[in-house]
Image: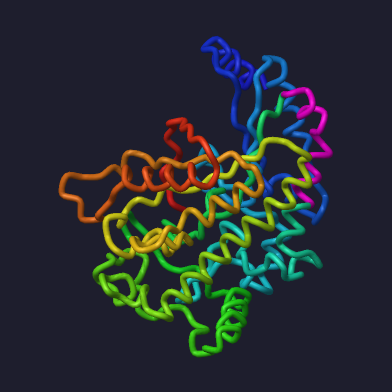
Amino acid sequence: PEAVRAELRHLKSLNVDGVVVDCWWGIVEAWTPQKYEWSGYRDLFGIIKEFKLKVQVVLSFHGSGECGSGGVLIALPRWVLEIAQENQDIFFTDREGRRNTECLSWGIDKERVLRGRTGIEVYFDFMRSFHMEFRSLSEEGLISAIEVGLGASGELRYPSCPEKMGWRYPGIGEFQCYDRYMQKNLRQSALARGHLFWARGPDNAGYYNSRSHETGFFCDGGDYDSYYGRFFLNWYSGILIDHVDQVLSLATLAFDGAAIVVKIPSIYWWHRTASHAAELTAGFYNPTNRDGYSPVFRMLKKHSIILKVVCYGPEFTVQENDEAFADPEGLTWQVRCCYERSMGSWSICKCRECSSMS
């Protein structure tokens, strides 16, 4: 506690307004479903209050390794990992069947596989518990905003570029839709369209470290723009948008008018190609012939949120001989235009987030 006070005293001397605090699901609801342990955070908020600083809280529904948690491994709750011993399909899964244990698959948002609760109910119960525990601090103005984690690294995206699977920049990443719940949803969507043979993921989309032109799906004139490709990408991005809608609907209910923040990634490599492959695998259906951000922003506007756009670190800067066809400025311009059309005025705070794409 005294070390924290010393750090906060230094920040206060620099005229800092406040700090960001991650509230980790894997810590608070670690051992038993719906048994929440907030005492450590209560103590921390009390210390911050001593210095009359504000807090932006991040509700982190993902796990974290060396990035974002001070080098400490923070896993999902133990009781969730126990469920996973019997049912690994609660996690996002790639084409080869590898599971990503960083966060829960959106395929279980409506499936009662978490000791009788759905994924959405688990998130809502956690948010409601936080609000009940710290409502007085919000009313006092100590808590200025609440950022709701919506995917990998807390960002609104599929975990398409996990370093633990061997991904390295500027790989295009892989689709994460091969758990049985996502596959069931895909089958239902294909049946509704009358094309059951579309109930599959692309078989020519390459691997984590592939380049766009090396694949039949993402290359210029590739299958991403075929009838099947457009169906699949509409479905894949639609799952992301549906997840946003469900979680934010309950967040608005749980937090009763508090400012809510959503973090989206800036996936700018391969942005100067036709397919924008890395954006597609992350869930943003944004090739050159389609605006993939406006549908997302319209959904965010529905819930009156504050948008935070992640800017990745120096290892992702564009090189002179750029083989990744990266275009951070072009992507920022597109995102800004879509935001202003959908949500109103634009303001930006330039900060450098952790660059790991977990």
Along the line of sight, the residue nearer the viewer: 347 or 354: 347
Residue at the image position 62 percent from the left and 22 percent from the top: 4
From the viewer's perspective, is 39 left or right of 291?
A: right
From the viewer's perspective, is 254 left or right of 347?
A: right
Magenta residues, as a range?
Answer: 125-141
Q: Position of residue 344 (x, y in %)?
A: 53, 39
Q: Is residue 234 magenta?
A: no
From the viewer's perspective, is 81 left or right of 166?
A: right
Residue 172 can be seen in this image: no
Q: Name, please, the residue furthest toward the top.
A: 13
Is 223 rendered above or below residue 236? Answer: below
Along the line of sight, the residue nearer the viewer: 355 or 132: 132
Residue at the image position 67 percent from the left and 28 percent from the top: 144
Q: Position of residue 216 (x, y in %)?
A: 29, 77
Along the line of sight, the residue nearer the viewer: 111 or 300: 300
Q: Position of residue 64 (x, y in %)?
A: 55, 48
Majority secondary structure in the magenta region: helix
Residue at the image position 53 percent from the left and 71 percent from the top: 235
From the viewer's perspective, is 75 left or right of 157?
A: right
